């Protein structure tokens, strides 16, 4: 039976609430691979198509992740046929399970990230912004700023390691305060 | 594999650059070592947060799916098994599509006389569109003048320069700066505008955006409703409806500001628009640089304003705006302390001939000993004898850094191109807006001087 308007709104808000968690779950199953956004979108569509089968009050994240997992596995098989190197299924599933997080944790992480980005120097921040906000290759940025690509990669490594350390510290602080 | 090598390989993995034996070695390490899996988790979430931060708004907003489907049909785009009449994430907008060439350009534009623009395209060679056309990836910079945007989706926009925008998708514009009005028809619901301070999703409406460098971006809703999400701090989301205006506070929350329809054009001017008001702006890192410029013989001198919404802390008072006394470095008694939206209205009366006053110049001085309080942002409105208020000009002047502990001052002088700013005026009203950087976006207003003479003959109507 079709959901009424209130139920539909509630369902959509559940999808929205778990969007970041689903995104992370999918990345954990296919790290470094193209197509994460596609899989997320396909998952959203399937979630919507199956909305009538979801039992209100049951674990939405578990249900959504199970659907996402099927989509990822299909995508992984396709990538494997194309010759991409993938973690074996057991390890991929183990990592995905150990990496599960609630939306609240992800929200805390985003806040911590914002805080830590504020500590970066302007050039460091610009490099991070380029890497994650632009569809262009690092080679283009290297040409723009007159630095060798490898030098930029080293900088990226150092900045991300610093961000990771900073975020860990911030999360510890949040949890201590709360 | 030591910890540094592990971190390096994990970063390479999430960058999609890890291959061969190194990939196998990392896989083995992750199988065997729980600590390595913890590091994997940390880098996973760092990577995910950075990616999500860059496109989070796209992933989180909701629009009716049937509208998306209709839009695709109109643009002759084939989709892969889309269900109709569903309500689902906007992220689905970019699901696996096999797009055929659109039958019409994504966006065409027209320019007003005297407009100076520069266009660049992401497409290359024979794909570069001809004429006044933007396709996804195209960037339009407006040095000055006005541009009308017409999207294939039916969205209309009027851009006032200086402006810099990039069309990302048929339903998404990145606005780096500029003053833009948009009208979005029902079939284009879900249209988005990203600015440096916020991301906006239209929910069927008419709205304006002001985005300026070193200034907090504003959104004004004239019809319908929009959803806005701050890019800063707590990234607060707010649903704005008709008649509401907000600016994006630096903590990520939204703050009220007066609705200003007059800031926006909704039609393309047919003649070159010359500025009626000439704004001369000055700043100094010396706080008392303009202390000697205050006037004790202007039209406001001796008048007390009808004042609403001022911060009266530390004995600051809006009466100090027109007292002709600048005051010492730290002298709150001689200062007016603004809040966003605070107003000071002066009744000049009708002058010697009962025709009001010709306003020839307005001078405004702000300064403090630090924290950006010396910047200034305000709107002045004038009311002709027997008439209604109209906006004369808006000032947004933020040259002083909030980190300038030594303080600083700004002075703005408005004059008219014809020598007269406004004629036949009986009342004048100032509304404080928000400056960047200071506490609560307030500033310390030292003096307001309005110069003019009684109007000699009735203005032609």
Image (cartoon, rainbow, N blue to C red):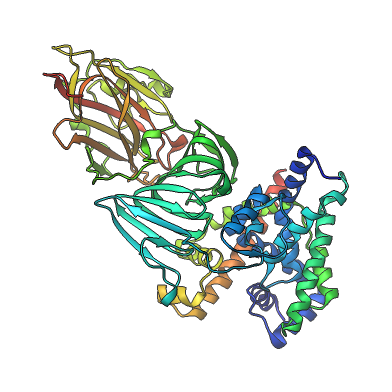
- Residue at figure coordinates x 76%, y 43% from the top left: A8
Residue situated furthest left in the rendering:
B456
The residue closer to the viewer here, B175 or A109, is B175
Question: Is B57 situated left or right of A139 in this image?
Answer: right
- Residue at figure coordinates x 58%, y 54% from the top left: A114
Q: What is the x, y in percent for residue B150?
A: 43, 52
The residue closer to the viewer here, B415 or A91, is B415
Q: Is residue B383 among the parts visible in the rendering?
A: yes
- Indicate whether A126 appears above or below B287: below
- Indicate whether A164 appears above or below A148: above
Q: Is residue B214 among the parts visible in the rendering?
A: no
Q: What is the x, y in percent for residue B434?
A: 41, 36
Name the quadrant containing residue B118: bottom left
- Indicate whether A77 appears above or below B292: below
Question: Is B250 situated left or right of B52 in this image?
Answer: left
The residue closer to the viewer here, B425 or B154, is B154
């Amino acid at each position: 039976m079709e959901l009424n308007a209130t139920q539909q709104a509630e369902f959509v808000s559940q999808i929205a609430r778990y969007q970041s968690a689903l995104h992370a779950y999918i990345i954990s199953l296919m790290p470094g691979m193209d197509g994460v956004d596609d899989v997320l979108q396909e998952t959203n569509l399937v979630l919507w198509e199956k909305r009538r089968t979801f039992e209100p009050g049951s674990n939405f994240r578990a249900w959504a992740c199970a659907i996402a997992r099927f989509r990822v596995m299909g995508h992984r098989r396709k990538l494997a046929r194309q010759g991409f190197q993938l973690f074996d299924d057991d390890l991929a599933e183990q990592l995905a399970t150990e990496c599960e997080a609630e939306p609240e944790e992800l929200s805390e992480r985003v806040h911590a990230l914002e805080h830590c980005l504020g500590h970066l120097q302007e050039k460091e921040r610009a490099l991070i912004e380029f890497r994650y906000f632009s569809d262009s290759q690092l080679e283009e940025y290297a040409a723009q700023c007159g630095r060798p690509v490898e030098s930029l990669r080293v900088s990226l490594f150092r900045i991300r390691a610093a961000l990771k350390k900073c975020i860990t510290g911030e999360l510890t602080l949040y949890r201590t305060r709360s | 594999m030591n910890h540094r090598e592990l971190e390096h390989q994990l970063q390479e993995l999430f960058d999609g650059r890890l291959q061969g034996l190194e990939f196998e070695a990392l896989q083995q390490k992750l199988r065997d070592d729980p600590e390595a899996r913890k590091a994997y988790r940390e880098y996973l979430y760092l990577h995910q947060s950075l990616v999500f931060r860059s496109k989070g708004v796209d992933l989180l907003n909701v629009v009716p799916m049937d509208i998306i489907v209709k839009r695709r049909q109109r643009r002759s785009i084939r989709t892969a098994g889309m269900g109709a009449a569903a309500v689902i994430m906007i992220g689905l907008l970019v699901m696996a599509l096999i797009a055929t060439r659109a039958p019409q350009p994504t966006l065409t534009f027209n320019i007003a006389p005297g407009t100076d623009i520069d266009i660049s395209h992401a497409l290359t060679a024979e794909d570069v569109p001809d004429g006044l056309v933007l396709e996804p990836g195209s960037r339009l910079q407006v040095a000055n003048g006005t541009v009308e945007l017409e999207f294939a989706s039916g969205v209309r926009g009027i851009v006032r320069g200086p402006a810099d925008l990039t069309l990302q998708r048929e339903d998404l514009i990145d606005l780096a700066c500029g003053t833009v009005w948009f009208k979005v028809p029902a079939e284009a619901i879900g249209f988005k505008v990203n600015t440096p301070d916020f991301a906006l999703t239209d929910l069927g409406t008419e709205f304006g955006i002001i985005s300026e460098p070193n200034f907090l971006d504003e959104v004004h809703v004239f019809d319908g409703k929009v959803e806005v999400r701050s890019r800063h701090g707590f990234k607060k989301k707010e649903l704005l409806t008709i008649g509401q205006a907000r600016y994006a506070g630096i903590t990520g929350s939204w703050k009220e500001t007066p609705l200003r329809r007059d800031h926006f054009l909704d039609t393309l001017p047919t003649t070159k628009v010359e500025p009626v008001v000439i704004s001369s702006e000055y700043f100094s890192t010396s706080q008392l640089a303009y202390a000697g410029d205050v006037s004790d013989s202007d039209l406001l001198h001796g008048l007390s304003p009808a004042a609403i919404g001022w911060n009266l802390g530390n004995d600051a008072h809006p009466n100090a705006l027109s007292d002709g006394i600048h005051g010492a470095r730290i002298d709150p008694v001689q200062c007016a302390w603004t809040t966003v939206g605070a107003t000071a209205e002066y009744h000049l009366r009708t002058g010697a001939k009962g025709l009001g006053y010709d306003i020839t110049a307005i001078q405004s001085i702000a300064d403090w000993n630090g924290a950006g309080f010396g910047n200034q942002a305000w709107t002045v409105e004038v009311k002709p004898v027997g008439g209604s208020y109209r906006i004369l000009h808006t000032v947004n002047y933020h040259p002083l850094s909030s980190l300038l502990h030594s303080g600083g001052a700004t002075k703005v002088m408005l004059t008219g191109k014809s020598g007269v700013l406004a004629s036949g005026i009986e009342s004048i009203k100032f509304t404080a807006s928000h400056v960047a950087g200071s506490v609560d976006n307030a500033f310390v207003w030292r003096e307001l001087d309005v110069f003019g003479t009684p109007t000699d003959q009735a203005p032609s109507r």
